């Protein structure tokens, strides 16, 4: 698992970490300026970068590297993971278009199946063409059951049916896929809330997990996304996808700082095993080297 | 965050505006604010550095420092430079029949949706396009394109092969045979560092003697946009860019990076999930958006279509004279509602968030009820609304005094905004 993380982030680590180390050991007067650029390159954003630089100005250069790590890790570790029990345990996956919600459900489904759990997928994306078929293929691939629906159907009603089905079939886990929507579209956010309401009516603890999927290549907009979804639904976790490329996903640090919701997994590819539990220390280490 | 930025930028703008003449040091400080605004917009830091340097050279010149309107001068330079780098809209090159167009890009960037949008656009121009689902990788990619295309009666090449290159070749021969005049290839999402998949892209490229090889880029992309653009450009070679998902609140700074790195034109922008949501690229609009100035031009255009001309004229007059009454306020909210999904639109305006709240149906009803419970005198001159009047209005409208207070507060905010616009605090006078 850890190996995979390192593979996924190897390139990022090399570029960012090596550069930082090189910069820091060189001790030239441009030091802070160059560090600033490195932090920007990681998509950490203006505010966080400025905060970090301010901290660094107070200490000698040889301590820079440790201090940067410390700051980032403390933000990421500052939020606790609270897992709720339930049978079925209900997970709802939300996020903007194309970030990897459906794929992540496939991967998490696979992980749960490996733990011996009985898993049901609910195809509540009744909007994007191909979304139903896509989740169906994932269900077959990982050995999960699935509740499908018609395009244009009410996602709330599909969620309702899926919950009933999960109950009757004695499922351990219910994973709900939703349509991608930009967080700025009000009516669509209302639809999300409705799915949540329907599930809460069935079981006050449900959904036990509301997971925001964030594309790792996203820049500062991820913050707006996270805030909007958190405000509307109350998130319990974040999955950061597509870290197998060269993007570093640094914005997630700011996201965690802002909304206080933990990152749970990272996605490092399109395959069913390309999911890694998130470990703040490993993430930052891999990011900075 | 978004508002924070606009604030910052306004600070920078005010900073330029407050003093008469500027020293080079003033300019530096102002440019520092603009630098941050660009970074927040996801413009790559290297591109930002280059950009600021260019602007600085011009901004510290005689023309600006001696000018009596240094603020306008500098903003103008920033804005014009941005537009210059962003380049102009260029139409698709369709040099033969059939004309092959290949779409490439990262996973989930919007290729499949864009393929159908392009077909739609081309059909409107009298073309007869064929869509080719050359993504053999993503689960149900074929079904997605087929079903989306079927909705608009576009023909899709429906032979299913595990080899995207072979499939592309066969599709092209069929297009020749059946006399389609454009062939749009929707390919699998690929990482720029995935050598195997990049090789596939090269093979597809070499198989279909293309007219356009377009890189589809998500407007929300961060700093990595430069790496993606550079690698696709170097390893495959693109002819243009399509920027998607600009209907959200991403500032779209990635566009500047991509444009700077590849030198290839941004051909179209995606502004929604629907087939008609593909627009020609306008550098002025994107420039003001990247700067956080609000996309006034887009707003103006959409508003023009939806708002009755007469109302628009009256409203604008009042806005300029800063004498907006609560009646106008209500009328305007109603008109704006007719513009369709208003939240997005209105947020394009500086300070537009204040308005956006009223777009909500419930909010609107409440607002309407409150304003209707006022006397005409109160509506025209809300200053006279004291405690007892507030209680009466609340009772009459079935709301609370807090609700009334809130409305009045927000109304004042809008009035203030209007006044500031009038004073030119917002760059409304920009050559947009
Ligand atoms: N490289 C890479 N691609 C991914 C990852 N997760 C998802 N994808 C791809 O991103 C695209 C969109 O994913 P999908 O699950 O359909 O997104 P959704 O619209 O949010 O449901 C698909 O082509 C996926 O294969 C990941 O971790 N790495
Ligand atoms: N809001 C919005 N969504 C878009 C736009 N273009 C594509 N999408 C959505 O982004 C997601 C991924 O698009 P898709 O065409 O499947 O991407 P592909 O993986 O590159 O083929 C889908 O949910 C699309 O509906 C756009 O301009 N605006
Ligand atoms: Mg999906
Ligand atoms: Mg596709």
Image (spheres, rainbow, N blue to C red):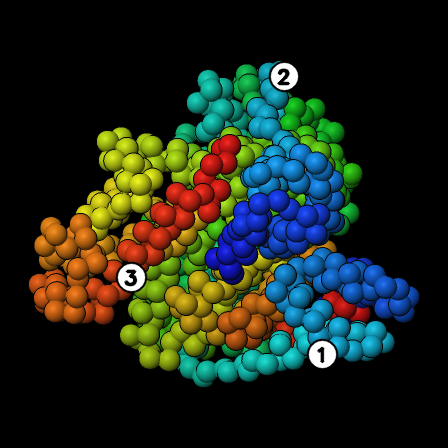
x and y percentages locating residue B195 in the rendered image: 77, 47
> Badge 2, how many Cα within 10 Å: few under 14, some, many 20+?
few
Which of the two discs, 3 and 2, sits closer to the camera?
A: 3
x and y percentages locating residue B49 in the rendered image: 73, 48
> Badge 3, how many Cα within 10 Å: few under 14, some, many 20+?
few
Q: Say which residue appears at 65% left-offset and 80% top-offset.
A: A74
Q: Say which residue appears at 45% left-offset and 53% top-offset.
A: A182
Query: Does the Cβ of the disc 3 residue fall within 8 Å of ligand 2?
Result: no
Which of the two discs, 2 and 1, sits closer to the camera?
A: 1
Q: Say which residue appears at 31% left-offset and 41% top-offset.
A: B321
The quadrant in which residue A47 appears is bottom right
x and y percentages locating residue A72 in the rendered image: 67, 74
**Residue marked by disc 2:** B95
Chain letter for the residue marked with disc 1 in the picture = A
Whole-angstrom CA distance, mark 3 to mark 2, is 59 Å
**Residue marked by disc 3:** B409
Between residues A11 and B261, which one lies in front from this camera angle?
Answer: B261
Element on which disc 2 rests:
loop
Image position of A189 (left or right of B65): left
Whole-angstrom CA distance, mark 2 to mark 1, is 57 Å
Q: Residue A70: give its label.
A: 1
């Amino acid at each position: 698992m850890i190996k995979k993380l390192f593979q996924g982030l190897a390139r990022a680590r090399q570029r960012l970490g090596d550069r930082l180390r090189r910069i820091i050991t060189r001790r030239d007067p441009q030091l802070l300026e160059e560090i600033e650029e490195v932090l920007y390159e990681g998509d950490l954003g203006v505010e966080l970068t400025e905060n970090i630089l301010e901290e660094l100005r107070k200490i000698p250069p040889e301590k820079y590297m440790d201090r940067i790590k410390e700051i980032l890790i403390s933000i990421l570790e500052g939020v606790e993971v609270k897992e709720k029990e339930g049978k079925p345990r209900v997970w709802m996956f939300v996020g903007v278009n194309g970030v990897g919600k459906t794929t992540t459900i496939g991967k998490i489904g696979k992980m749960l199946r490996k733990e011996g759990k009985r898993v049901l997928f609910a195809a509540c994306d009744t909007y994007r063409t191909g979304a139903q078929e896509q989740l169906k293929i994932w269900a077959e691939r990982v050995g999960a059951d699935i509740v499908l629906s018609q395009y244009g159907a009410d996602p709330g009603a599909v969620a309702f049916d899926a919950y009933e089905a999960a109950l009757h079939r004695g499922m351990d886990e219910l994973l709900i896929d939703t349509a991608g929507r930009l967080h700025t579209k009000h009516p669509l956010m209302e639809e999300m809330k409705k799915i949540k309401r329907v599930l809460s009516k069935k079981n006050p603890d449900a959904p036990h997990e509301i997971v925001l999927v964030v594309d790792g290549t996203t820049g500062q907009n991820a913050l707006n996304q996270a805030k909007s979804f958190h405000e509307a639904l109350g998130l319990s976790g974040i999955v950061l996808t597509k870290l197998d490329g060269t993007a570093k996903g640094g914005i997630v640090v700011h996201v965690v700082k802002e909304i206080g919701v933990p990152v749970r997994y990272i996605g490092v590819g399109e395959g069913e095993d390309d999911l890694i539990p998130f470990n703040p220390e490993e993430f930052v280490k891999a990011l900075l080297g | 965050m978004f508002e924070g930025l606009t604030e910052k930028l306004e600070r920078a703008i005010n900073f330029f505006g407050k003093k008469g003449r500027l020293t080079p040091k003033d300019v530096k400080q102002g440019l520092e604010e603009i630098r941050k605004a660009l970074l927040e917009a996801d413009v790559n830091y290297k591109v930002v550095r280059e950009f600021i340097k260019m602007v600085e050279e011009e901004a510290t010149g005689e023309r600006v420092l001696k000018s009596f309107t240094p603020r306008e001068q500098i903003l103008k330079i920033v804005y014009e430079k941005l537009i210059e780098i962003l380049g102009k809209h260029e139409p698709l090159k369709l040099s033969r029949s059939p004309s092959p167009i290949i779409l490439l890009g990262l996973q989930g960037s919007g290729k499949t949706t864009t393929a159908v949008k392009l077909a739609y656009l081309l059909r409107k121009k009298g073309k007869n396009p064929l869509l080719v689902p050359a993504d053999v990788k993503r689960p149900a990619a074929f079904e997605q394109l087929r079903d989306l295309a079927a909705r608009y009666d576009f023909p899709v090449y429906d032979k299913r092969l595990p080899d995207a290159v072979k499939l592309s070749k066969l599709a092209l021969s069929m297009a020749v045979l059946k006399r389609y005049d454009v062939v749009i290839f929707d390919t699998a999402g690929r990482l720029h560092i995935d050598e195997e998949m990049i090789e596939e892209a090269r093979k597809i490229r070499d198989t279909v003697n293309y007219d356009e090889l377009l890189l589809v880029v998500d407007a929300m992309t961060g700093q990595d946009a430069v790496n993606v653009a550079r690698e696709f450009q170097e390893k495959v070679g693109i002819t243009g860019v399509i920027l998607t998902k600009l209907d959200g609140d991403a500032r779209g700074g990635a566009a500047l990076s991509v444009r700077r790195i590849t030198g290839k034109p941004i051909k179209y922008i995606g502004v929604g999930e629907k087939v008609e949501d593909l627009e020609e690229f306008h550098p002025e609009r994107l420039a003001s958006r990247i700067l956080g100035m609000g996309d006034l031009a887009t707003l103006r255009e959409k508003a023009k279509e939806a708002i009755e001309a007469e109302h628009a004229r009256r409203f604008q007059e009042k806005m300029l004279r800063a004498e907006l009454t609560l009646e106008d306020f209500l009328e305007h909210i109603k008109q704006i509602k007719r513009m369709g999904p208003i939240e997005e639109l209105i947020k394009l305006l500086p300070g537009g968030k204040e308005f956006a709240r009223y777009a909500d149906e419930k909010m609107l009803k409440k607002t309407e009820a409150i304003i209707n419970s006022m006397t005409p005198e109160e509506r025209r001159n809300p200053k006279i609304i004291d405690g007892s009047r507030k209680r009466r209005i609340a009772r009459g409208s079935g709301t609370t005094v807090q609700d009334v207070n809130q409305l009045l507060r927000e109304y004042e905010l809008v009035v203030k905004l209007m006044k500031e616009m009038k004073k030119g605090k917002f760059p409304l006078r920009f050559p947009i």
